[in-house]
């Protein structure tokens, strides 16, 4: 039995199983391949035998390696997307919650929200606004130096 015949038999079996072949629990019987590798003196031609086995293993291993590579690339891509989104979230969290453009540097006490910039703070002082724009609790505002 040649490597191509083995691969065709395996492929036909896989097609009959609707591609639900379980690579981990399958048992492969090499007795036919060993018998076909024997010469007239009943000795095994090891080169023929090894090439047949190699063909069978490559038939199973190559698609699995391709899937692993594909999944590793997908994981790498998703990790980069997560990192980019986390960077954007951090950037948004640092922006003033009133004007959404300047960096926050005023903290409200007692709630502890660091949520407005100096420009919006001066507008709050001008209009006598003393509540936190996030939780609406009254409190004092303090400048945070970074």
Image (cartoon, rainbow, N blue to C red):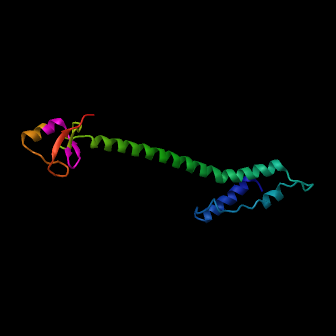
Q: Position of residue 135 (x, y in %)?
A: 19, 52
In the rendered image of this protein, does residue 114 appear above or below residue 30?
Answer: above
In percent of the image, x 44 and y 47: which residue is there? 78
Left or right side of 88 for 77: right
Q: Position of residue 29 (x, y in %)?
A: 75, 62
Where, quadrant-wise, is the C terminus in this rendering?
A: top left
Instruction: Verify whether residue 112 appears in magenta.
Output: yes
Residue found farthest to the bottom: 17
Left or right side of 58 for 116: left
Please report the bounds of the magenta region as a residue range. 108-121
Number of numbered labels in the structure image = 0
In percent of the image, x 15 and y 47: which residue is there? 139
Residue found farthest to the top: 146
Q: Position of residue 79 (x, y in %)?
A: 44, 45
Left or right side of 84 for 129: left
In percent of the image, x 63 and y 49: which residue is there? 62
In percent of the image, x 93 and y 54: which residue is there? 41
Where, quadrant-wise, is the N terminus in this rendering?
A: bottom right
Q: Position of residue 10 (x, y in %)?
A: 67, 59
Instruction: Verify whether residue 4 appears in magenta.
Output: no
Residue found farthest to the left: 127
């Amino acid at each position: 039995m040649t490597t191509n015949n083995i691969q065709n038999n395996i492929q036909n079996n896989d097609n009959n199983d609707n591609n639900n072949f379980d690579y981990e629990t399958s048992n492969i019987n090499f007795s036919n391949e060993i018998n076909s590798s024997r010469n007239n003196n009943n000795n095994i031609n090891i080169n023929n035998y090894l090439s047949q086995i190699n063909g069978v293993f490559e038939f199973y291993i190559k698609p699995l390696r391709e899937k692993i590579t594909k999944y590793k690339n997908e994981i790498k891509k998703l990790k980069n997307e997560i990192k980019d989104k986390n960077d954007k979230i951090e950037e948004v969290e640092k922006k003033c919650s009133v004007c959404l453009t300047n960096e926050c540097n005023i903290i409200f006490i007692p709630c502890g929200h660091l949520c407005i910039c100096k420009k919006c703070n001066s507008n709050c002082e001008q209009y006598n606004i003393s509540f936190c724009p996030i939780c609406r609790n009254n409190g004092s505002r303090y400048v945070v130096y970074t």
